[in-house]
């Protein structure tokens, strides 16, 4: 009988070692969760030196409660957004010719329509719980100044990105 009681005690001790909880930010024990609560998205939009010299570029975005417009002043604009699920993230680039500059008609002019987007998911505590995905194009090209000026005036270098995620983190199309 003594051996049976000792064996049961040993089994109970061993099983208690395999039960675990994690501590949340307040220090209390809560069960671990892998349910996504947020999408965290990084958006990068590059531009060329020619674009910086001859155009005005602005990036407008709306993500959750955040809404803003920024002027592009460097060769790559980048921003990370964190949005509660379900949620949407929209980013737009507007490109216009500078009034004080004229693109020489025969000058070679490089430009990009490229962008890259990647996202992941986090739980309520901000812990990464699920990989997301990525999207983008690498579209750097060049043309003669007169043709590129026409492309800019027609709005063909403007860019609009819209991503909507449901409550489970699935990308909606």
Image (cartoon, grey):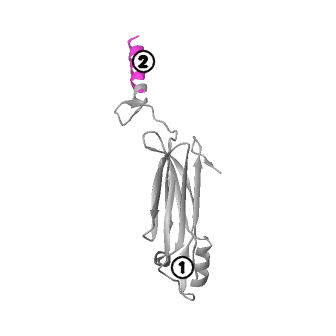
Q: Position of residue 11 (x, y in %)?
A: 42, 22
Q: Quadrant of residue 125?
A: top left
Residue indicated by mark 1: 110
User: Looking at the rendering, which quadrant does residue 10 occupy?
Assistant: top left
Q: Please say whether residue 7 is one of the residues in the magenta stretch.
A: yes
Residue located farthest toward the bottom when viewing the structure as drawn: 106
Sequence-wise, the earlier of marks 1 and 2 is 2
Magenta part mainly helix, strand or loop? helix
Of the residues tagged 1 and 2, which is closer to the observer? 1
> In terms of depth relative to the viewer, which is nearer, 126 or 22?
126
What is the residue that sits farthest to the right in this orientation?
Answer: 173
Residue 132 drawn at (x, y percent): 54, 51
Secondary element at tag 2: helix
The residue where tag 2 is placed is 8
* Image quarter (top left, top right, bottom left or bottom right) of the N terminus: top left
Label 1 to label 2, Cα distance in Å? 76 Å
Q: Nearer the viewer, residue 19 or 137?
A: 137
Q: Residues within 10 Å of mark 1 (few under 14, many from 20)?
A: some
Q: Examine the structure image and report whether residue 24 is included in the region drawn in magenta.
A: no
Residue numbers of the magenta segment: 1-14
């Amino acid at each position: 009988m003594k051996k049976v009681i000792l064996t049961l005690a040993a089994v109970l001790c061993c099983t208690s070692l395999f039960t675990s909880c994690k501590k949340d930010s307040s220090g209390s024990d809560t069960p671990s969760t892998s349910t996504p609560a947020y999408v965290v998205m990084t958006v990068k939009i590059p531009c060329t030196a020619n674009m910086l010299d001859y155009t005005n570029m602005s990036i407008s975005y709306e993500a959750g409660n955040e809404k803003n417009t920024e002027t592009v002043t460097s060769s790559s604009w980048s921003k990370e957004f964190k949005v509660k699920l379900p949620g949407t993230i929209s980013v737009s680039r507007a490109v216009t010719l500078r009034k004080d500059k004229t693109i020489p008609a025969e000058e070679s002019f490089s430009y990009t329509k490229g962008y890259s987007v990647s996202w992941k998911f986090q739980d309520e505590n901000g812990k990464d719980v699920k990989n997301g995905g990525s999207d983008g194009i690498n579209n750097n090209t060049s043309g003669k100044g007169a043709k590129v000026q026409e492309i800019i005036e027609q709005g063909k270098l403007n860019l609009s990105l819209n991503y909507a995620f449901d409550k489970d983190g699935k990308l909606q199309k």
